[in-house]
Amino acid sequence: MATFLGEYTQNSLVLLELLIKGDDEQPILPDDAPTVAIETFMAGGLHEIYSDILQSIENGRYYVLYDVPNSAILGDYVVTYRCTIKGIDFVAKERFRVTDALSLLMKVYQVSNDIQLDLGNPSIEKTNVYSSIKALSLQLDTFKQSLDPKPVLVEVNNYTLLTNDGFNTTVLINNRPLAGVKVQAYSDLQPTVLAGRGITNEKGEWSISLYKGSYRFDFIHPNGSILKQVRKAV
């Protein structure tokens, strides 16, 4: 059964985290960076609305922060993590619910031992209720800000990634662009796990989306040989 992460509102952050460890509690390196996908129920069944590569933290922990959009449909969402270890595919699932802010706040008060809210009771001071809601909202905003700076996804390409000599990394062989060259990025935090990949087009151009950090970029010829390596922070 999928673990229930909780209820969230639109414009809130959901921490999606995967722990990869063995029975001895030691981290296990996956073959590639783990991925995550989010699906929600629409007409005809589940539909994928989001996917990403998880970022390594330490000690077998991988994560991504999902920013629930303002346009998110209210309802249940299914989170699917995938990773491959020694050629074997593993899948883990979680779920969460997106609800409107007022409903979530009302549930908080209903389970509170300190506040018993009865909207039909005229003796309750509405100003106290609104003040309490405002105070909780400020706490939620403070919590969201405490997660910042959240990881920033940036586009890295042959024009933004420069060699140590200051040249762009458009792939040319004998001054002619070469298509089909694999560009693979490995984070300094997890140098054996693929963080992102791209492939050159007929103009020798390429592009990868990565979170800010320091990486090693391997340029691999279609025949499998390494053309060059570039280490840069993005």
Image (tube, rainbow, N blue to C red):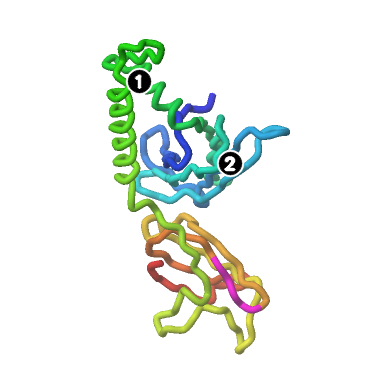
The answer to whether residue 96 is seen in the rendering is no
The front one of 170 and 95 is: 95
Instruction: Identify the residue at image location x=51%, y=78%.
Output: 169
Residue tagged by mark 1?
109
Residue farthest along the right direction in this orientation: 44
> From what the image shows, is residue 227 above or below residue 12?
below
Q: Residue at x 47, y 60 (%)?
A: 210
Residue segment shown in magenta: 203-207
Picture coordinates of residue 84, whole percent (x, y): 55, 45
The residue singled out by tag 2 in the image is 89
Q: Tag 1's secondary structure?
A: helix
Residue 30 on image: x %, y %: 49, 47
Q: Earlier in the sequence, mark 2 or mark 1?
A: 2
Residue 21 in view of the camera = yes
Asked if residue 160 is positioned above or below residue 149 in the image, the reply reads: below
Question: How many C-alpha atoms fall within 10 Å of the one at disc 1: few (<14), some, or many (≥20)?
Answer: some
Q: Give how far across and how far down residue 66 sits, in percent.
A: 47, 44
Q: Residue at x 31, y 40 (%)?
A: 143
Amino acid, disc 2? Asp
Numbered disc 2: secondary structure: strand
Q: Quadrant of residue 137?
A: top left
Quadrant in which the N terminus appears: top right
